Amino acid sequence: MKRKDGFKGERSIVLPQAVIRLIEDDPVASSIFITDIGYYPKARYHYRKREPPIREYVFIYCVDGKGWYVVGGRRYAVKQGQYFILPAEVVHEYGADEDDPWSIYWIHFRGTLARFYAGGCLTPADIKPGINSRINARISLFEEIFNTLNTSYAIENIRYAMATFQHYLASLRYIQQYRGAAVTPDSSDLVGMAIHFLEENVERRLTINEICGFVGLSPSRLSTIFKERTGYSPLNYFLLLKMKRACAFLDDTEMKITQISAKLGFDDQFYFSRLFSRMMGMSPRSYRHRSKT
């Protein structure tokens, strides 16, 4: 089980049984549908064992930290940038790493198409940033699903959320096609590649060495050409991207400031608020109030 007091910055939705019965009778939404959905940042002591098993498939996408799971007597290790899907009607258990707890997006789902999307996903699959990766876009799809369900359980909202969920799963199962459909940075544009890497990891904490490792430059060389092009150091530009994303969450969602802070990789909400105030000229609360008047 997760901690009784939850995880700082967590978000979750459990669809009521009345809504699930409505979905099961709907010819559109019933093909593949969500019953539970959420996000747990830095989920220390997170643990779940299901015996007897549940009817739903369990999707977990680890965006930071580490974890593990056990199915059929076999233990699997999970690291940052991997996802897996646990089969329905099968006993399983999983949990966060004790020293480096995972941050995860998770979804419970079922439906007539569920087994086709879940098949072959028991072993952890990699989703690594690359020149043509679309991690940021996929996370936006998750947010769209979550926000749609959080807004209303009207049938049109349900149908849209479940159709978007099928697209979300397809972006993983057909990852090359998903990546190939996007315009990608020029591989000779090293600053553009670095910016793409920052955007793909905006919810994580990065070091200059990780950025340099992606583009193949030394820290001093990357810093020089990056500042010439943007006016900022790579890490300061990364903070600007985080503040831009924070503004979008404040404008477009009902997420609490604690949730926004955790989602953007800040362990300390007060540090996040001070940084936001310094960079935006007002506190997150003031910004949210101003943006809605």
Image (spheres, rainbow, N blue to C red):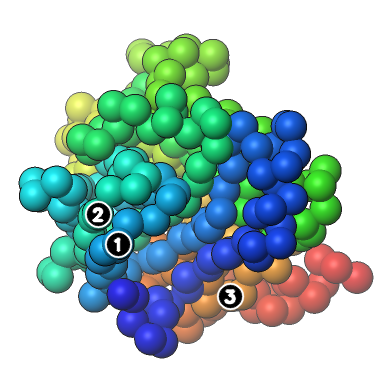
Residue pointed to by mark 2: 91
How crowded pointer 3 is (Cα within 10 Å; few <14, some 14-19, many 20+) is rated as: many
Is 185 situated left or right of 142 in this image?
left
**Considering only order in the chain, which callout, 2 or 1, is on the residue closer to the N terminus?**
1
Q: Three-letter amino acid code at disc 2?
A: Val
How crowded pointer 1 is (Cα within 10 Å; few <14, some 14-19, many 20+) is rated as: few
Res 284 seen here: yes
* Residue contact at pointers 1 and 2, CB within 8 angstroms: yes
Residue pointed to by mark 3: 257
**Considering only order in the chain, which callout, 2 or 3, is on the residue closer to the N terminus?**
2
Res 81 seen here: no
Q: Is residue 168 above or below residue 74?
A: above
In the picture, the quarter occupied by the C terminus is bottom right
Nearer the observer, 92 or 84 = 92
Q: Three-letter amino acid code at disc 1?
A: Pro
**Considering only order in the chain, which callout, 1 or 3, is on the residue closer to the N terminus?**
1
Q: Secondary structure at mark 3?
A: helix
Instruction: State the mark number for residue 4.
Output: none
Q: CA distance from mark 1 to mark 2?
A: 6 Å
How crowded pointer 2 is (Cα within 10 Å; few <14, some 14-19, many 20+) is rated as: some
User: Residue at coordinates 83% horizontally, 53% vertically from top-left?
Assistant: 154
Residue 103 at x, y = what percent? 34, 60
Instruction: State the mark number for residue 52.
Output: 1
